[in-house]
Image (cartoon, grey):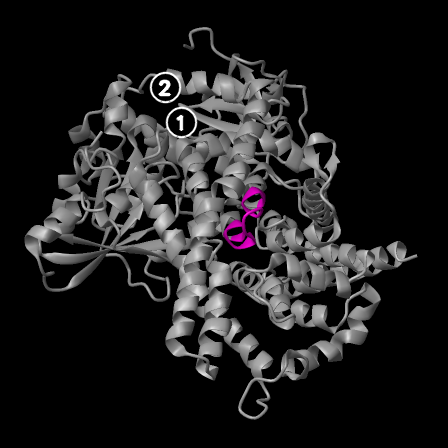
Amino acid sequence: MSSCHGDGNCGPATLLAEAAGASGPGSRLVAIIGPPNSGKSTLFNRLTGLRQRVANFPGVTVEHRLGKAQVRGHFDVDLVDLPGIYSLSPRSEDERVAHDVLHGRMAGLPRPDAILLILDSTNLSRHLTLAAPILALGRPTLILLNLADDLRARGGDVDVDSLSASLGAPAVLISATTGEGIEAVEKFLARGIALPRPVELPILQDVPRCRQWARGVSEEANYRHPAPPEWSRRLDRVFLHPVWGPVIFVIVVGAVFQTIFTGARPLMDAVQAFVQISGDWLGRLLGPSLLKSLICDGLWSGVGSVIVFLPQILLLFLFIGILEDSGYLARAALIADRTMARVGLQGKSFIPLLSAYACAVPAIMATRTIENKRDRIATILIAPFMTCSARLPVYTLVIAAFLPDRPFIGPLLGTRAAALLGLYVLGFVAAVVTARVLKSSILRSERTPFVLEMPPYRRPTLRSLGLRVTERAEIFLKRAGTVILGVSFVLWLLASTPLIHGAPPPIEHSLAGRLGHTIEPLIRPLGFNWKIGVGLICSLAAREVIVSTLGTIYGMEPGKDAASLQHALQRDLTPAGAVSLLVFFAFAMQCMSTLAVVRRETGGWRWPAIQFAYMSALAYVSSFLVYNLLSR
Amino acid sequence: MQLSFKKVSDQSGLRSLAELGPGEDATLVRLDLPHDFANRLMELGFLPGSPVLAAFSAPGGDPRVFRVEGAEIALRRETALQILISPAPAAAH
């Protein structure tokens, strides 16, 4: 192992950049391509470090990474990391993207000047198949045989020179994890390389022919297949054991949950305290003025109420990163497949749905691994039913206000915890039922073929986990700084206008208050008055906003005086109304960020519109029924 | 190699991959699956003429993991039923 795990400055590209200083003339684009699990991303991270960003190609939902590798001061090389593919025939969306980029047909991206083809050397005879279509492009290509350390450790071998000769392009053994052989990549990036010598390639459309060609080439190069990784088998014997497998699965999922909720708590409290203290400080600095009201009560508390969730989301991504990099995620999908199949989905939908318990936004982004479009959309549509962490403050407030805490099932589970658990179950049931309905109606598809390659178990590196978490933090904070900031501003404006004698009006007479009164006839059948109405309108931006809004309406700080907010709620809601409110929050689609991400991921407004309409209707009807049944 | 779209017929005496017991190996003969899906499986290593070995299965017994050319691929039973195999040559492994 290299000595620089987790250290952002240890990539050779960075070292060279430090030595070389400024970039040279011109800029070249080099594409990294390879099959899934070949170590593409590890290589990309090694070459670019933190100088990378995630981007979406226009019109498609496939994500790609762009990064800069400064090499020996000759060139500033732009690297693009393409999705993992087995062939270049444009069948799946991933393959189409790779195909279009390599042919220079992707809008906004020039045709790559050179290609780094990365293959898993422990799986060479299979992975070489991809070399045929890549070499047929006739671009300068360097073939990287990754996992060289693994190959040797397991007694495999390959004659690289002979392989280069039969492919007509240079090949090198490397290890993207340890950095072995990376100099060759740098040399290639710095100096460029001649076009490949034309060699006889098979007809690309004929898959069996291509496979035979690949096998022939690897035999010619005296490829000795490494012994199967015995310890990986041994782990599978445990993780896929008929009894222990599911037990471990439940423990892993439970541990993820527990950490997201209880482990993140101190961190969230710290962020909350920071938001509170800095807000107070800002308030004192500005003095009582309209500006203070805008900045402290409007923007800062609005953005702050969302930033509080940052620790939870980062922990979630850390966990998913560990599970994915270690190879367990594929096993989890395998275990979950049978259960998911019952509701018409497949094993790969399991991870996004698990993530949705923290937040639907990363969950919806995580559906990218599902190749079947209909399964993917079904998963996207049901993900917001999972009880996300933004519902938690609302649930906690209402339950605490209306339900005395008594032992329910023994001393372990109190009434309040039981009610909370019930709401989690409610969301889950709504998701399952919706999935069934969708998969047997508008999203009906052929029983999806489920194919999943089981990657060997690997030790996750701190470096890659660090990069993942930083990347997600950046995306999340960017959203808090744009969307949430904008919504907070609008809310503040509605709550503070029209001005009366130069001061904000009492909330009842503000635009927000009038809006609340306007919709009161609509929500009265659900047991809500205009104050709850204002809260509902505001919570359209994000669910947890209702807590701070109700605090504003009742004229108190929700954080400081939770008990009095509960008392105020008791005056305005009957117990039946409280249950109705909880049911409403369990089902309603009150999250701009989710709608925005659904639009981006599905490439249009159609699905977010359907989702919003469906969830709102379900919430309204269910709340109506619950309220009227209970008030009888 | 041929690709056909009709249901599995047993006249040839071939078995389906789903009947392969854990730890048993065989030779792949034919993939009775839609063209694109068959191609995809062939890219993954399910190539007619290649050896295949049944490895682990998910705790419920479905999907199962098959080993082809050093890779482990999970397939559902309904897919495995459409893949035909013949007994492995005695010399194999």
Label 1 Cα crowd, 10 Å radius (few <14 / some 14-19 / many 20+): many
Of A604 and A258, nearer the camera is A258
**Position in image of residue A519 (x %, y %):** 75, 76
Q: Residue at x 59, y 91 (%)?
A: A500
Is residue A345 shown left or right of residue A303? Answer: right
Occupied quadrant, residue A209: top left
Of A40 and A627, nearer the camera is A627
The C terminus of chain A - image quarter: bottom right
Is residue A361 shown left or right of residue A514? Answer: left
**Position in image of residue B22 (x %, y %):** 56, 14
Residue that numbered label 1 is attached to: A456
**Position in image of residue A236 (x %, y %):** 48, 20
Question: What amino acid does circle 1 point to?
Answer: Pro
Residue A471: which disc?
none
Is residue B83 shown left or right of residue A415? Answer: left
Residue that numbered label 2 is attached to: A229
Q: Secondary structure at mark 2?
A: loop
Give the mark nearer the N terminus: 2 vs 1.
2
Of A351 and A604, nearer the camera is A351
Marks 2,1: beta carbons within 8 A: yes
Q: Residue at x 61, y 39 (%)?
A: A346
**Position in image of residue A617 (x %, y %):** 75, 62
Q: Is residue A344 magenta?
A: no
Work out how far the residue at label 2 is from the one at label 1, CA to CA, in angstroms: 8 Å
The N terminus of chain A - image quarter: top left
